Image (spheres, rainbow, N blue to C red):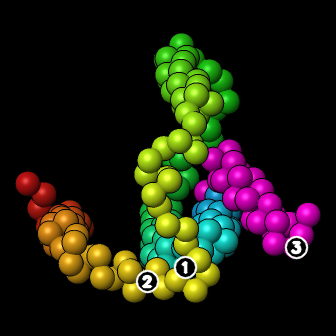
Amino acid sequence: MNAEQLIFYFFAALVLISALMVVTMQNLVRSIFLFFVTLFSLAALYVFALADFIAVTQVVIYVGGVLVLMLFAFMLSNKELLNSLEPIKRTFKLNHLAGIFICLSFLFILVSLIVQIDFSGLDWIKSAAPILEGDNTIHAIGMHSMTRYLLPFEVLSVFLMMALIGAAHLARKGKKI
C-alpha cells in the first residue's frame, strides 16, 4: 500500500467517523465543529477524485458559508431557547419502528441493486473519457454552464434570488402576516 492510498483511507475513515459523531453527539457546539471536520475531509476526498472545482466549492460554500452561518445562529440564539432544549432520549417508540423499517428496506434495495449491476457493461461508463491530472475541469465546467446549461443556470439563479427574498421577508422585524 502506497502513501496515496494511506492518505485516502485516512480521510475516508475521518469522514465516516466524524459524520457518525455529528449525528450521535448530544452537544450541539461539538457537533457543529465535527461537521467542519467532516466537510474538510470530504473536500480532501474530492481532491483525490481529481475534482478540484468541487473541492474548492465544498470549502468555500459549505465550510465558509453554511457552517459559519450555523455557528453564528447558534451563538446569537436566545439563551432561554437553548436551555429549553431537552437532551435526546435514546428510547425507541413504536412510531420509530416504521422509519427504521423503511430505512432498512431502502438500504436492502440499494445494496441488492449495487450487487446486481455490472458496472463495466454500462454504455455511459464505457464511453466516458477518464479524467487525467492535466485536465482543466474548471474550464470545462465554465464552458458547459455558459453554453449547454445556460437555461438551467439562469433558472437556478432566479430560484436562489426567490429564496433570498423569502428569507429576508421572514427575518424582518415586523408584524407577521
State the image coordinates of residue 36 (x, y, percent, origin top left): 62, 69
State the image coordinates of residue 44 (x, y, percent, origin top left): 66, 72
Q: Earlier in the sequence, mark 1 or mark 2?
A: 1
Is 3 one of the magenta-colored residues? Answer: yes
Is any atom of residue 26 visible in this view?
A: no
Is any atom of residue 145 visible in this view?
A: yes
Q: Which residue is mark 2?
A: 138
Tell me the residue at 48%/44% (across/down). 122
Amino acid found under the numbered disc labelled 1: Asp
Q: Secondary structure at mark 1?
A: helix
Q: Secondary structure at mark 3?
A: helix
Q: Secondary structure at mark 2?
A: helix
Question: Which of the two residues, 75 or 122, is positioned nearer the viewer here?
Answer: 122
Amino acid found under the numbered disc labelled 2: Ile
State the image coordinates of residue 139 (x, y, percent, origin top left): 39, 86
Q: Earlier in the sequence, mark 1 or mark 3?
A: 3
Magenta segment, which residues?
Answer: 1-28
Question: Which of the two residues, 62 or 33, is positioned nearer the viewer here?
Answer: 62
Relative to 86, residue 116 above or below: above
Q: Which residue is mark 3?
A: 3
Q: Is residue 175 left or right of residue 3?
A: left
Question: Which of the two residues, 153 or 128, is positioned nearer the viewer here?
Answer: 128
Q: Which residue is mark 1?
A: 52
Q: Is residue 137 left or right of residue 163?
A: right
Q: CA distance from mark 1 to mark 3?
A: 20 Å
Q: Most prominent secondary structure in the magenta stretch?
A: helix
Q: Is residue 169 left or right of residue 31?
A: left
- Asked if marks 2 and 3 touch (Cβ < 8 Å), the reply is no
Amino acid found under the numbered disc labelled 3: Ala
Other-residue count near label 3 (Cα within 10 Å), few / some / many at <14 / 14–19 / ≥20: few
Tell me the residue at 49%/73% (across/down). 54
